[in-house]
Image (cartoon, rainbow, N blue to C red):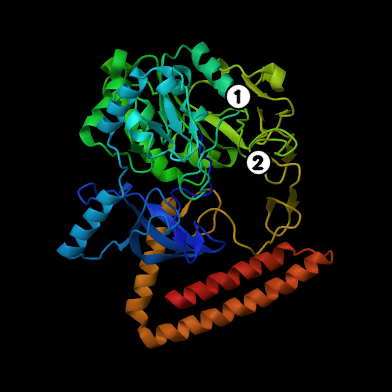
Amino acid sequence: MAAPRDGLGAVETEGNGGRSESSGAEVVLSSDPATPAPLCPHGPTLLFVKVSQGREGTRRFYACSACRDRKDCNFFQWEDEKLSGARLAAREAYNRRCQPPLSRTQCVERYLKFIELPLSQRKFCQRCQQLLLPDDWEKHGEHQVVGDVSLTQLKRPSRLLYPLENKKTNAQYLFADRSCQFLVDLLSTLGFRRVLCVGTPRYSQFYMEDSFCHYNMFNHHFFDGKAALEVCRTFLQEDKGEGVIMVTDPPFGGLVEPLAVTFKKLIAMWKEGQSQDNSHKELPIFWIFPYFFESRICQFFPSFCMLDYQVDYDNHALYKHGKTGRKQSPVRIFTNIPPNKIILPIEEGYRFCPLCQRYVSLENQHCEHCNSCTSKDGRKWNHCFFCKKCVKPSWIHCSICNHCALPDHSCEGPKDGCFVCGELDHKRSTCPNISTSKKVNKYCLHRRGRRHMKMSLKFYRAVRKKKQRKSNKMKMETTKGQSMNHTSVTRKKERRETAHQYLCS
């Protein structure tokens, strides 16, 4: 079961989900466990801060960890907001009403009764997506019902359940048979006997209490409390943690930061069962995610590498092979298992690179300058001697930006990376200039006074408009075939520094 949706875990800001072109919201990883986050129906909320290119908002807020659209979960609370007792009581009552109609214990009781029924009485309602007991038949008399549900079908719930299609909350996509079989064979070949699947929603009615936990992967929340937490702990620490692997296929719109925090907590839970001699070992993990998240994932898990294997989905138009899908799926497997131990199927177009000591895509050629097979998307990449790295074949080196990009890119447009300084190698949360910029702003406000600050801002806006006009003029000249020389770039940088020094002097 997979869920590569557009934005679980992202926050809707200014009418758009997640980050817009120039502004958005980023999660704040709380460093104070003594201050618990308020609860919504999906468990503890996450703390966010509004950011825009070049500056950070001063007020932070809590929002749902699981829903990107406020139509699905409208929780919102400022970090410094004080709520009355009446509002807190109303919120608790609302959270209880939003929980599933059946508890885990009730689901298990219904399942045990269901498997005791003769085959002719085992029915499943496709409309309600529910196993039916004889007492339920009358209520579902006009619904589309499947009969003669076998034990084989019960062991593969995805064959009974319809995948949900709300991309902002519960969209679910299924591995193609070839990808599913590859994963099963690979896990068996590597010697794993138990698999912790993180991200298998709606399976509650098909498993016993020791095999399934209702869990939110974005905040490490077990909905059934400590009992469910102990089930997970026992499973991970069985046989001293040997023979177990965690496989997760999170929603593709989910934020990497909270996912990484959650996975580290599961790793710590597994390590509790390890002896002192095995303290250096890691819980084996397969994290299935698009290749363009590689830098973010490796930032939190330096031991991870990305396999070239392309994971396909049956019920997704873009993430599968065939006439209706992309030629190349962008979904990969990130793992801390050494890649030289993982054999990719040669019949699907993979080969072994003796220099890299791992299997790669057929067109992923070894670059002698980078000393590795550099392609991420399955195509042959080209080495740029200016950038000193390999880039996509459709990219060219831009003398204005001084890096490779698409031919029709906007040099002045917003770029990925840090919202504070604009650098591409880190995010706002790890920017070394955050504390400096906050001190400068505070210094300006206290030293200059409100009236003088308005004058400074007016001057700065004038400088910015003048710079923008010149930038547009240079952009038009570049289109006509002219290039900007090094002197122009230097003068532009000097003007920017002069304006900044004026504001903060």
Residue at x-position 34% and y-position 71%: 442
C-alpha separation, residue under disc 2 versus residue under disc 1: 16 Å
Can residue 350 be seen at all in this image of the molecule? no
The residue type indicated by label 2 comes to Leu
Q: Provide residue 353's location: percent of width, then percent of height.
A: 68, 20
The residue type indicated by label 1 comes to Asp
Residue at x-position 41% and y-position 24%: 122
Residue at x-position 70% and y-position 66%: 487
Marked residue nearer the N-terminal end (2 or 1):
1
Where 458 falls versus 48 (above or below)? below
Left or right: residue 478 versus residue 85 is right
Near mark 2 (Cα within 10 A), the count class, few <14, some 14-19 or many ≥20, is some
| Callout 1: SS | helix
Residue 318: which numbered mark, if any?
2
Q: Which residue ends up furthest to the left in the rendered image?
A: 85
Task: Between residue 361 and residue 248, name the one nearer to us.
Answer: 248
Q: Provide residue 232's location: percent of width, then percent of height.
A: 30, 27
Left or right: residue 502 versus residue 182 is left
Residue 177: which numbered mark, if any?
1
Mark 2 vs mark 1: in front: 1
Where 405 falls versus 325 (above or below)? below
